[in-house]
Amino acid sequence: MKVKMIVAMDDQRFIGKNGELPWKLSADMSRFRNLTIADGYNAVIMGRKTWDSLPAAYKPLPERLNIVMSRDTSWKDEKVESALYPGRAIEIAYANGCNECWIIGGAQIYNMYQDMVEEIHLTMVHTSESGNISFPEIDWGNWKESVIEKIPKDDRNEHNTTYSIWEKK
Ligand SMILES: NC(=O)c1ccc[n+]([C@@H]2O[C@H](COP(=O)([O-])OP(=O)(O)OC[C@H]3O[C@@H](n4cnc5c(N)ncnc54)[C@H](OP(=O)(O)O)[C@@H]3O)[C@@H](O)[C@H]2O)c1
């Protein structure tokens, strides 16, 4: 099972604003959906705050095993699996026969898993001061970038974006 991370951040590493996503980026949302569903049976691991931020219509994210991390032993939602520690979330994905396990945020969860992933799918959102929640500092010197796609802003995408895949060297 492959463990991968997917994130969109602005030029200052901001990923969230007051518990929400800071931008409307339709192309990025579609890519997120396609990559994390793919054609296999995949899991997504997210923090409890990111789970709380999802609109009701997307809870759980369809066609994926949703795993929510919380330190609260009484946290439960019948629509998802819950995990108390990082290794447990990976175990649940593995035990369910998932092909890929995607770390989908937010900041606390990205920080926890940064040493466990082999790929980071990164959308750089070309703007700044987007929010108040940041992606952790990573030594990008240990990673190799392949730029995949640049998407200009338009009426469905608020900013210019660059999508890259970073592989651990
Ligand atoms: N731009 C992007 O790509 C992207 C992607 C995802 C999310 N976001 C944004 O990120 C923000 C949320 O990020 P966040 O850092 O505030 O919250 P988060 O990472 O989504 O969730 C934090 C919660 O995860 C649980 N947790 C943290 N460490 C844990 C551990 N070691 N073991 C078990 N559970 C643990 C805790 O839940 P309990 O408090 O229940 O114990 C904690 O409060 C939102 O604004 C969201 O929109 C952005």
Image: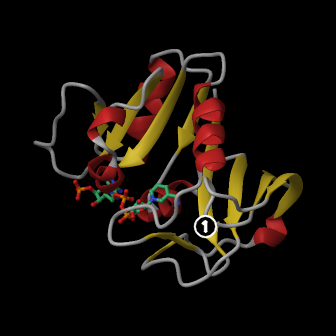
Numbered-mark total: 1
> What residue is shown with label 1?
9
Residue that lies at the very extreme toward the front in this rendered image:
155
Q: Is residue 89 left or right of residue 97?
A: left
Q: Residue at x 61, y 38 (%)?
A: 30
Image position of 33 with respect to 123: above or below: above
At x 29%, y 29%, the residue is 80
Amino acid type shown at disc 1:
Met
User: Colour scheme of this structure image?
Assistant: secondary structure
> As rendered, which of 44 and 89 lies closer to the eye?
44
Horizontal side, residue 67 vs residue 5: left or right = left
Image quadrant occupied by the N terminus:
top right
Q: In the displayed structure, would residue 159 be above or below residue 70?
A: below
**Quadrant assignment for ligand 1:** bottom left
* Cβ at disc 1 under 8 Å from ligand 1: yes
- Asked whether the viewer can see residue 116, the reply is no
Q: Is residue 49 above or below residue 79?
A: below
Question: Residue 96 appears at what percent x and percent y?
Answer: 45, 16
Query: Residue 161: x and y, percent?
Result: 73, 62
Q: Is residue 15 left or right of residue 123?
A: left
- The image quadrant of residue 123 is bottom right
Q: Residues within 10 Å of mark 1 (few under 14, many from 20)?
A: many
Give the residue drawn at x 83%, y 71%: 141
Q: Quadrant of residue 41?
A: top right
Q: From the top left corner, tell me how far across and down residue 63 is, in percent.
A: 47, 20
Q: Secondary structure at mark 1?
A: strand
Residue closest to the far bottom: 129
